[in-house]
Amino acid sequence: MKLVKKSKSVFYRLVFSFMILMLTATIFMGTASYMYYTRSFNEEIKRVQLQMISYVQTITNEHLIQNPLDLYLQLTMSSSKNNNLLLFLDEPLDGNHAHIQTIFNTLKEKRIGSSPMVDDIQVYYPSNELIISSTKGLKYVGSETASLSDFRWIQDPAIIESSSIQWHMNETNVSLIGTLPYIRSDEERAFVAIHLQKNVVSEWLETTFQETSGTMLIASPDGFIAMSSSLIESASYIRDHPMYVDHLKSTQTEGYFSMEIAGQEHQVAFSSLDLPGWKLFNFVPVEHFQQKSAAIQRTIFLLGIVTVIGGLIMSYIISGRLYGPLQRMLGRIRTLSISSEGSGASDEYREINQFIDTMSVKVEDLENTLNHNLPLMKSRLVEETLAGKIQHLEAWRERMEMLHQKEASGDWFVAVSFQLKQQTIQQMSVENQAFTTYRIKDYMEEKTPSGMHVFTSEHDQRIDAVVCSSIEQGDILHGWMNEVIAFAREQFRMNLAGAIGSWTTEVGKMKLSHAEALFYLGYAYFYPNQSVFTHNESTSLDTMLPATFFDEFSQALLKKQRKPLDKLMTRFFKRLTKPAASPSVLHQDIRDLLYTYYRTLKSIPLSTRDILPDHLMTTLVTHESVDEFIAVFNEVIELTLNYLEKKPEQAQNGTIEQVKKYCIDHLDQELSLHAVADIVHLSPRYVSRIFKQETELNFVDYVTNLRMQKAKQLLVESNSNVEQVANSVGYHNPAYFSKKFKEAFGVTPSKYRQTRGGEG
């Protein structure tokens, strides 16, 4: 009964499902892996063995065949060292015994310098019936050579009568035999034989490839050339085996077969060497691979057991984690009595189904809520897109699906911005501002051109929009923006300015397009009669006004020079009405001009409130176009000049008095012309010029005189020593102070104190 009750629990059903899934998957994967391994095992053995024998074949061709051939060519090619070898082709032995020693030394040197496989190098001269060997020296053809196996090759008519390179084999040696290339007739020629020891070749084969699986055998139609020591006992069996014989005689360059040796199955791979009929065989016992495969099979079996056990544990854990939230949800359902009465005690699945049926009723309400919030979601989408938070087209299309706007997933995107005039919007109530902004946004989306989709968002006094389209439609977009601007003018008497960024096929670059639109929107201030701005209005010339311009403006204002001021203002206003720089640079020029104006008045000192009426000061700050600024600033300059003409002394002397006062208050500090110019916000050159005009002293002489007068006062009226007095007036070197004091008054500071003290 308890088992039946538990079977209705979601938790135990999940555990049971995971157990079935893990067992099924493990059995399937284990069976498939075993079948695959069994099917591909032999192929893998064959592939590995063929790769290995291919490598061995390359090395064997080089050492067993190519090296003796290279040695033969060195001996027979035409050179001064080899001329002695040709001597006995047509010269008698008498009188040439010294040359025999030279030939012997040459052959000996070549043998020692060659591979250890080379046992001997011999040269046979038929015309003189003699043989010169690198190991046995001079031998005459006759009875003494008949018993020596090393010289039996000269008795083979097939070799002596041939003019090509041949390979000869006997019980102990494999020999390369060829003629000397200097041949005058069939009788006048010699033969070179390079003998390789079979046992040395076998040792080399076994030593070089001792780490390679299996054993090696080199064979030719004449017999075995070399073999691994483990095959020596089975050599006769292998030689007569039909499989071996068939593959040795076959024309295949490489192959693979199986044969039994000493009661053990072997996998045999073979490959042809560079000599006709010579082949390399590799014998690997099948048991060698089966040992490896047994370990793999055991590993697969153990992994299967571990997987099943781990799967059972994981199924219990995962089921618990999945069931935990579900159990809490069921508890909540039962607490709220959302499901039908008594259902929880019978079957959790039925209870969950009833809960889902109950909750599905509210889906329609949720969809309605979503539809009501679509404008807010669209606005949020625009903000994130223009901020560069949506980087990929896939993310954009997902958002379009959520907004039920799948058709708006175009290939081209562009940012658009509209600027609402500040004065107009500020005159409206908050309610009217919101109504006007949303009505313009609705019109923008309602009048969207065919093939385009527009999504809008408002920011203070600006409306931003993301426009997407299947193709780039610059002219159509420009016309649509003019329609929106005309609508705002007709319906709300509101002047708008619009700007278009660059078109792009990458939604992640919309942040750059938006930045461009805002940059172009800056030109609306300088082109008040133009409505829509694109990159055509932008300029790459960011020429700055020189600092001397503002100094000249300040000086002309202080001196009330109307003509120079008119000339400077004409130059400045022309720069604004025909922009040769970006909006940010031009606005900075305006700020610098206003700052210079305020600073000049402050240096007199005067306040703008003493000169300008409140409405003019307000307009100077809140104006919205360059035309307004020009009109207002001309009025400001006129009122300022009229005011200054009534107070000439204050205007002329204000800056100089400020400089003098600063010098008196800071005698103990550095009083350079640059430092003082920074205090009065003027250039050093300009300060120097007006100071000289007003005081008839240059600035340095004035400061020096001021310091000396103060030093005299301190020497008489204080008890400070000379060094302290020097520091008090800005001299940190007492010796230099004494020098300057004596230049000014003819006596040293100490003498001056004594003199004045005595008088006192």
Image (cartoon, helix red, strand yellow):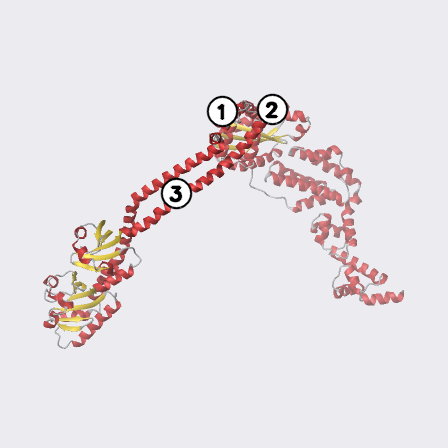
- Residue type, label 2: Arg
Image marks 2 and 1: residues in contact by CB distance under 8 Å: no
In percent of width and height, residue 429 lies at: 68, 26
Residue at the spot of label 1 = 450
Disc 1/disc 3 C-alpha distance (Å): 63 Å
- Residue type, label 1: Ser
Number of numbered tags placed on the structure image = 3
For label 2, the crowd category at 10 Å Cα-Cα, with few meaning under 14, some 14 to 19 and many 20 or more, is some
Mark 1 / mark 3, whichever is N-terminal: 3
Disc 2/disc 1 C-alpha distance (Å): 21 Å
- Residue type, label 3: Gly
For label 1, the crowd category at 10 Å Cα-Cα, with few meaning under 14, some 14 to 19 and many 20 or more, is few
Disc 2/disc 3 C-alpha distance (Å): 69 Å
Q: Is mark 2 on a helix, strand or loop?
A: helix
Residue at (20% x, 49% y) in the render: 252
Q: Is mark 3 on a helix, strand or loop?
A: helix
Image marks 2 and 3: residues in contact by CB distance under 8 Å: no
In percent of width and height, residue 658 lies at: 77, 49
Mark 2 / mark 3, whichever is N-terminal: 3
Mark 2 / mark 1, whichever is N-terminal: 2
In percent of width and height, residue 684 lies at: 70, 51
* Observer-nearest of 637 and 757: 757
* Observer-nearest of 179 and 108: 108
Residue at the spot of label 3 = 304
Q: Quadrant of the C terminus?
A: bottom right
> Which mark lies nearer to you, 1 or 3?
3
Residue at the spot of label 2 = 439
For label 3, the crowd category at 10 Å Cα-Cα, with few meaning under 14, some 14 to 19 and many 20 or more, is some
In percent of width and height, residue 205 lies at: 26, 60
Residue at (73% x, 34% y) in the render: 616
